[in-house]
Image (cartoon, rainbow, N blue to C red):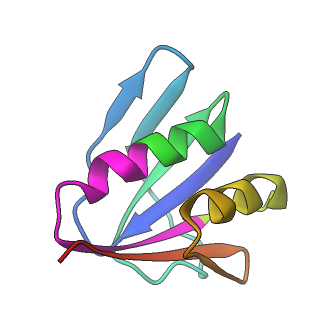
Amino acid sequence: MKLIIASNRQLPIRHYQEPFCQIQRGFRSPSHITLPFFVEIQASDPVRSATIYIEEVKRQYLSSEFEIFCFDQDVLLPLQQYFRIGLVVNEVLCLTFNTR
């Protein structure tokens, strides 16, 4: 399963063995994505991989925005329930974090 995570902050590249998850720089973003930095995630468990990745990245910044794009609503809905602050618009889950 593939999904795209975009942010207003620089996003790191990662590769996890368990469960399989490869995070690489995105080459083309869908027109729904409005934030400048994005990565593509290929994962056997995209919900778990995306939550781990976003939690890891958001700890690095005082405030950050994320957009998660996936055609599969079965991926976006659990992510929206996990973060409890997301708004889904045009197949994109929008998240804003402020840790101040």
Front residue of 63/92: it is 63
Q: Quadrant of residue 87?
A: bottom right
Look at the picture and state if 86 lies above or below 55.
below
Measuring 62% from the left and 65% from the top, which residue is drawn there? 69
Q: Is residue 77 left or right of residue 40?
A: right
Q: Quadrant of residue 92?
A: bottom right
Look at the picture and state if 26 lies above or below 20.
below
Q: Is residue 63 magenta?
A: yes
Look at the picture and state if 84 lies above or below 4.
below
Measuring 81% from the left and 57% from the top, which residue is drawn there? 72
Instruction: Give the image location of residue 11, x and y in percent.
Output: 28, 55
Measuring 59% from the left and 81% from the top, which residue is drawn there? 31
Instruction: Decide if residue 68 is in sight here.
Output: yes
Look at the picture and state if 7 lies above or below 94.
above
Instruction: Give the image location of residue 5, x and y in percent.
Output: 48, 59
Q: Quadrant of residue 76?
A: bottom right
Residue found at the far top of this picture: 17
| Quarter of the image where the C terminus is located | bottom left
Instruction: Decide if residue 25 is in sight here.
Output: no
Measuring 56% from the left and 19% from the top, which residue is drawn there? 19
Magenta stretch, residue numbers: 53-68
| Quarter of the image where the N terminus is located | top right
Count of residue discs = 0
